[in-house]
Image (cartoon, grey):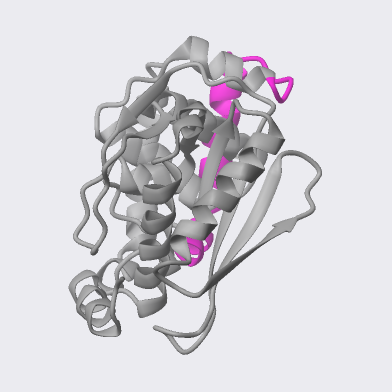
Amino acid sequence: MITLDQIKVFSKKYRINQTVIYREYLQLLWLSHFYKQKQSSEIYFKGGTAIHLIYNAPRFSEDLDFTSEVPQQDLDNLVNNTLKEVKRNIEIEIKERKVLAGKTYLLTALPSILPFKTFVKLDFSFREKVIKPAKSTIETDYPILFTSYIHHLSKEEIFAEKVRAILSRKKGRDIYDLWYLLTIGTEPNTPLIKEKLAYYNLKFGKNVINDLYKKISDFGSENFAKDLAPFVSEAERARLPELYEVIKDYLKRKFSII
């Protein structure tokens, strides 16, 4: 179990507040126990936290997102079994939240190590099939040892979902994630993007590319900086408005050849 002294060390090392450090520890602890279970191999980690923990993006994240190919009842069993294991380390509780689609749980670490509650949201989607699965191990400086593979979406499939996310919601972190995936060599996969957009009745083509860049351009540096600030180090926060301009120019060049 992590200690307050360790949290303080990591907080100083990464120049970010203690809540972010403890939340990431909770995320890793949950993943380490969740993926020890056999049927978890049919549940795929994805989203911004996967980009951070699997693909080493420097920005921190707050939720754990998954695509599940197991029945909801089986997922409930996996979640409950994981909770039992996590409770051996920390005081924690979980509650299911009512949502229109999928399953959402709120994981709450009770005041013990930190003097206030810390939250992690777990989101599970059932409506899509995973097209390009992958598996990885996680190495971390936190006092957690991973002994099982983490099953997750490939970076190409996460990229396709990020394209869709930018078109359907307004979050600066989606823009950041799209840019980061390109900088680590992710090749845009047109068939994957087409399939992801089809779930939202969107057709891939020049109009979609233009709409995508317009969404990014219209977001603005102020909104970008405000959305990203809680998830980057103190040293990076002042640079966020400039980073937005750098990302915008970079994506414009990339989109011209997609």
Q: Position of residue 108 (x, y in %)?
A: 57, 70
In the image, 238: left or right of 68?
Answer: left
Is residue 214 something that shows in the picture? no
In the image, 212: left or right of 102?
Answer: left
Q: Position of residue 53 (x, y in %)?
A: 32, 48
Q: Quadrant of the C terminus?
A: top left
Q: Position of residue 103 (x, y in %)?
A: 70, 44
Viewer-nearest residue: 82 or 204: 82
The residue shown at (26%, 58%) is 144
Stretch in magenta: 199-227
Viewer-nearest residue: 69 or 219: 69
User: Is residue 238 depicted above or below 74 in this figure?
Assistant: below
Viewer-nearest residue: 162 or 19: 19
The image quarter in which residue 20 lies: bottom left
Query: Magenta stretch: residue 214 in it?
Result: yes
The image quarter in which residue 13 lies: bottom left
Q: Position of residue 224 (x, y in %)?
A: 48, 58
The residue shown at (50%, 52%) is 82
Query: Magenta stretch: residue 248 in it?
Result: no
The residue shown at (34%, 48%) is 52
The residue shown at (38%, 58%) is 29
